[in-house]
Amino acid sequence: MAETPPPASPVGELVIRAIAMPADTNANGDIFGGWLMSQMDLGGAIVARNLARSRVVTVAVDGMSFVSPVDVGDTVTCYAQLCRVGRTSMKVSIEAWASHFAHDTPRRVTAGIFTYVAIDAEGKPRAVGQS
Ligand SMILES: CC(C)(COP(=O)(O)OP(=O)(O)OC[C@H]1O[C@@H](n2cnc3c(N)ncnc32)[C@H](O)[C@@H]1OP(=O)(O)O)[C@@H](O)C(=O)NCCC(=O)NCCS
């Protein structure tokens, strides 16, 4: 079955911009998928924290696939959009895009849905936005 082509431009709020460094590579010399996920996780947490007005933790990541490699020196940007708010949880759709500074137009490299839970000082779930 043919896959839906990725969108031509990012969807959501710009939450992270970083340069992929040699320290972020895997054993093959390519940028490590875990580094990319951590950037996305951080970016989504900014959105979730602002809404929850509390600490948050990541409880799940869904529907993630890596569609294009990221090279050392690429500029990586993450865009986040809130999709759903539950009692204590928030689902944030996050896209990562990469571009080479000299010659590239940005390309979408991966996307996923990150679920965050608002927590209290003991690490227990608390209602989103509760004062
Ligand atoms: C997140 C955590 C506080 C939730 O605690 P819990 O006792 O399971 O809480 P609950 O069952 O009441 O669920 C709380 C909310 O999370 C949601 N949730 C729990 N597990 C989920 C999952 N796997 N996927 C999606 N949502 C989930 C629930 O639906 C609920 O949402 P709602 O309040 O909006 O209806 C707890 O599981 C935890 O601390 N996990 C570790 C988080 C962490 O360390 N993350 C970083 C990993 S490196």
Image (cartoon, rainbow, N blue to C red):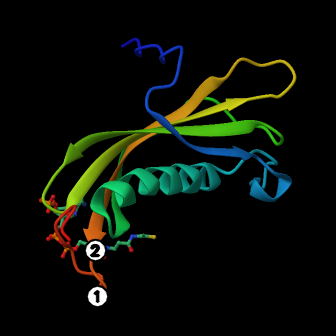
Instruction: Verify CB contact (< 8 Å) between mark 1 and mark 2.
Output: yes
Residue 80, given in percent of the width and then of the height, sits at 44, 40
Q: Residue furthest bottom?
A: 122
Mark 1: give few (<14), some (14-19) or many (20+) Cα within 10 Å. Answer: few
What amino acid type should be assigned to the residue bearing mark 1? Glu
Where, by quadrant of the figure, is residue 113 drawn?
A: top left
Q: Is residue 59 left or right of residue 22?
A: left
The alpha-carbon separation of the residues under discs 1 and 2 comes to 8 Å
**Residue 62 visible to the viewer:** yes
Residue beneath the point at 53% across and 35% down: 110
Q: Residue furthest left?
A: 87
Residue beneath the point at 63% across and 29% down: 68
Residue 13, given in percent of the width and then of the height, sits at 47, 36
Residue beneath the point at 67% across and 23% down: 106
Figure quarter occupied by ligand 1: bottom left
Mark 2 residue CB less than 8 A from any atom of ligand 1:
yes
- For disc 2, the marked residue is 119
- For disc 1, the marked residue is 122
Q: Is residue 115 left or right of residue 104?
A: left
State the residue in front, 10 or 67: 10
**Residue 66 visible to the viewer:** no
- Which type of secondary structure does the marked residue at label 1 adopt? loop
Disc assigned to residue 73: none
Mark 2: give few (<14), some (14-19) or many (20+) Cα within 10 Å. Answer: many
State the residue in front, 3 or 9: 9
Residue 58, given in percent of the width and then of the height, sits at 37, 63
